[in-house]
Amino acid sequence: MRKRAAFLIALVVLLSVSCGKSDTASQENDPAITSEEEAVDQDAETAEKEPAENASANENAASPDTAQSSAESADDAAGTDDADGSGAAEESAAAEVSTVKDTPEPEPEKEVVPYEWTAGTPEDAGLNDAFMESRHAAMEEIGTMSSLIVRHGVIADEYYADGYDEKTVFPVHSASKTITGALTGIAIDEGLLEGVDVPVAPFFPEMEESGRYEGLTVGHLLTNTSGIASTESRWYEWQSSPDWLQYLFELPIEAAPGQTFHYSTGNTHLLSAILEQVTGERLFDYAKEKIFDPVGLVSVRLHTDPQGIGDGWNGFSMTARDMALFGQRLLNKGSVNWEKVIPAEWVEEMSSVQVARGGAGTDYGYQTWVHTFAGHDGFYAYGFGNQYIFVIPDLELVITFTAPDMDENRFGVYRQLVNDIVSSCG
């Protein structure tokens, strides 16, 4: 009996030892089972092998412990079946991927391609060699720096004095006003301004509080009939003042709005300030977006006043070719190459007589001069020192001039040059 009991005890001990050895061997031979300490050591060792230059880029990366914990959590989620078989973990992962894919990348800034002019010959515009020789000689005599004749959208003649070429950027001075006039029409067309009858004073607290500007509208600024004393006789005093708008607010009122034409650059500066308010953009940015960029008019620059308001009355500069391109845009009722931004109706209004001056001088539209050349109706932008953009619609003709800021009494000479060209083309 004792022998049998001893035998049974020995058998139990032997079986226990054998089972223990079997479990240990199984663990040692299973590569899928790794201790947590080994996993952490592996991550740390991998981190030590990373190149030194990547250290700053990885400052926000998870530590080995965090990475291990995240990996274990992901493994747990991936290995857990949902009771209803919907796979919540997979849906969560898919949602993350979807979010990344749906995040829009910032659009690269659109490159503006300069307008490509077609070059023709004077004969294409009906201009003979003898006329061209006399034209060039006349311009050389009066100091013209550049001039283009464009007919049917083709450059028929391009003149530059020595030292200037198609890349030269010229200040166009008050020819800038016609650009600002065009921008006003665009703002009206877009509903940013209700029309030319919108009162001016509410845009400026100083005007509103003074009570001196009753009845003054945007239309009066456009036609230089505001009644506010002109800045032309106060030019240098105004330009040297620290605040151009404040200077305008302190000018006397000389006539009721709409009563008298009195050319004043201050009217256009008020327009520029209004346009910046209603568009929420700088004048230059709005002009680039609406007029310049769509047709590849790329050389333009613009000065500002001391407060940063765009100098839309005197501050634009551009090449002679871009001057002609702006004129071409007006000629085509706001469009070039099927790009239409300036409303055709507005081009018609701004280039039509809004103020008939009769014997007092050239008629005026909206920030644009209106005149008849050799029997053909036309209009033009004019800047100090003989900067011109002439447009003769029925002949599909655009003529530009730039000249030094020296002799202001040349309009008669340039008008005769235009008359001669119109007569030859007509």
Image (spheres, grey):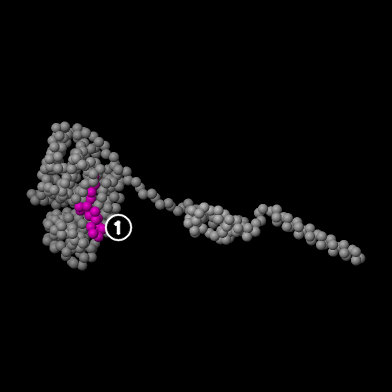
Judge left or right: residue 270 versus residue 142.
right
Depth check, front residue: 366 or 62: 62
Residue 397: tell me if it is visible.
no
**In the rendered structure, does residue 312 fall within the stretch colored magenta?**
yes
Depth check, front residue: 286 or 217: 286
Label 1 sits on a secondary structure element that is loop
Q: What secondary structure characterizes most of the magenta part?
A: loop
Q: Which residue is mark 1?
A: 280
**In the rendered structure, does residue 374 fall within the stretch colored magenta?**
no
Which residue is at 11% across, 45% downward? 410
| x then y, percent, for residue 339 | 30, 44
| x then y, percent, for residue 375 | 12, 40
Judge left or right: residue 38 versus residue 260.
right
The disc labelled 1 sits on which kind of residue?
Answer: Gly
Residue 409: tell me if it is visible.
yes
Considering every residue shown, the one lying at the far front of the view is: 52
- The picture quadrant where one finds residue 246 is bottom left
Which residue is at 88% across, 65% downward? 5
Considering every residue shown, the one lying at the far right of the view is: 1
Which residue is at 12% across, 50% downward? 356
Judge left or right: residue 7 versus residue 133.
right
- The picture quadrant where one finds residue 244 is bottom left
Q: Which residues are magenta?
A: 303-319
Relative vertical location of residue 324 with respect to residue 235 in this rendering, above or below:
above
Judge left or right: residue 304 versus residue 407.
right
| x then y, percent, for residue 242 | 21, 62
Which residue is at 21% across, 42% downward? 164
- The picture quadrant where one finds residue 251 is bottom left
